[in-house]
Structures are given as C-alpha cells and as structure tokens.
Amino acid sequence: MVTTEPRDGLRERSKARRREAILRSAYRLFAERGFDATTIADIAEAAEVSPRTVTLYFPSKLELALARSEALAERLRTALYDRKPGWLTLDALEYWLRGEIARRSDLDDLSERMFNLNPQLRAVSHGRLAEVVQEGARMFAAESGNAPAAFGPRMVAVTAAAIISELLHHPENADIDAAMEFLKAGVATLSSTGATTAPSASTAPDKA
C-alpha cells in the first residue's frame, strides 16, 4: 500500500525552510533598515516569496519580528509546567537554560542584531518573557510557602530574569553553573533572613 508519509514529511520540511527563509530575511532587513522602514513586500522580495505567503506564515510584521522570542518564552513556560517529577522550579529553569544555549544558531545572532537596532522590539520581547518568569515566581512561592507578592519570590524573579537575559544575550560567556549557583545562593540568603522558606531538596537536571 502506498503511504503519504514521505510526501507529508517533505511538505513539512519545505514549509519549515520557507518559514526560516522569511524569518532570516526579515531579521536581516530589520537589523539593517529598522523595523518601521521595512515592509512586508521588502521581506517577501528578500525571501523570494509572495507578500501573501509572508502573511500566511506571520499575520503581522510584529508577530514576525517576535516569532523567535515568543517561541522561546513558550518553551520556558512548557519547561516550568511540564517539569519532571521531583524537580523544583529552579531545576526546570536550569534545564531550559541549558537547552536554549545548546540549540542556539546564527538566526539567534541575527535576531540579536535586530533587537539592537530596534529597542522597542526588545522591550516587547522582554515583557513577554517577564510574564513567564512571573509565572515561575508564583510556582516558587508555592514551593517555599510564601505569597507570590512576598519579598522573597519577587527577588527570585528579578534575579532569574537578569540571569536569563545575560546568558541568552551573551552566550559566548555563558556559565550556567555559576549563574545557577548565584541564584541558589540568593535563595539561601533570603531563607536565612526569613524572607522566604527554602524549597525541599530535589533531583537536579543533568548537565549538558
């Protein structure tokens, strides 16, 4: 019996390549000309597709610009909510960070160039990631027996956000071990002052 799986697989790979070509062209143009000065038609021409194809993949120019950062935030959210049994929030954060550093590509470097020229896009991107970090802070609060708005969980959220930004924006100097030790030491300090209650011990994720 003839199966359609190979054809379907080819179609999906073709769609993925087209999507990446659109992203790559858009980020390069945003990095060179700026977000406001670049049109959908410009992106379509650079990607060698029609403007309609661009909008089929990305309904708006803003969605296109934020596509990778939105995906990154969603992967963090998934890592936090679907963490392995016995893992705490900080374990899930460490696992996610290691995965993001390992999967980084030149498209992420191009995305970084785009954000450098268009700080308004970076601000929106940071805001979306901050929302997910706050979700993680609420999980940490529940683990440590604190209210989400208590000082301890708020400090953990601020520190975690800073660590994420540093490691992802400067991957060439990324030291996840040192970053997580710093974060956990901060949690221990807060615990010793009564600002938060330390979570129970967990099985830490394997290091990549």
Image: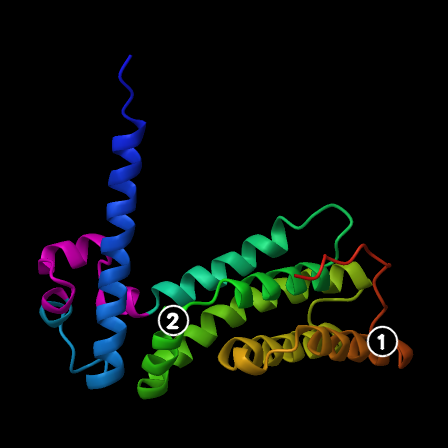
Quadrant into which the N terminus falls: top left
Which amino acid lies under the numbered mark 2 shown in the image of this protein? Asp
Q: Which residue is painted at 60% across and 61% down in the image?
A: 96
Q: Earlier in the sequence, mark 2 or mark 1?
A: 2
Q: Which residue is painted at 74% across and 45% down in the image?
A: 85
* 64 with respect to 132 (left or right): left
Part of the protein shown in magenta: 44-65
**Above or below for 140 versus 120:** above
Quadrant into which the C terminus falls: bottom right
Which amino acid lies under the numbered mark 1 shown in the image of this protein? Ala
* 129 with respect to 196 (left or right): left
Q: Quadrant of residue 167?
A: bottom right
Residue 164 location (% of width, % of height): 58, 75
Residue linked to disc 2: 106
Q: Residue furthest right?
A: 192
Residue 9 location (% of width, % of height): 31, 36
Residue 43 location (% of width, % of height): 15, 69
Q: CA distance from mark 2 to mark 1?
A: 37 Å
What mark, if any, has residue 188 been given in the picture?
1
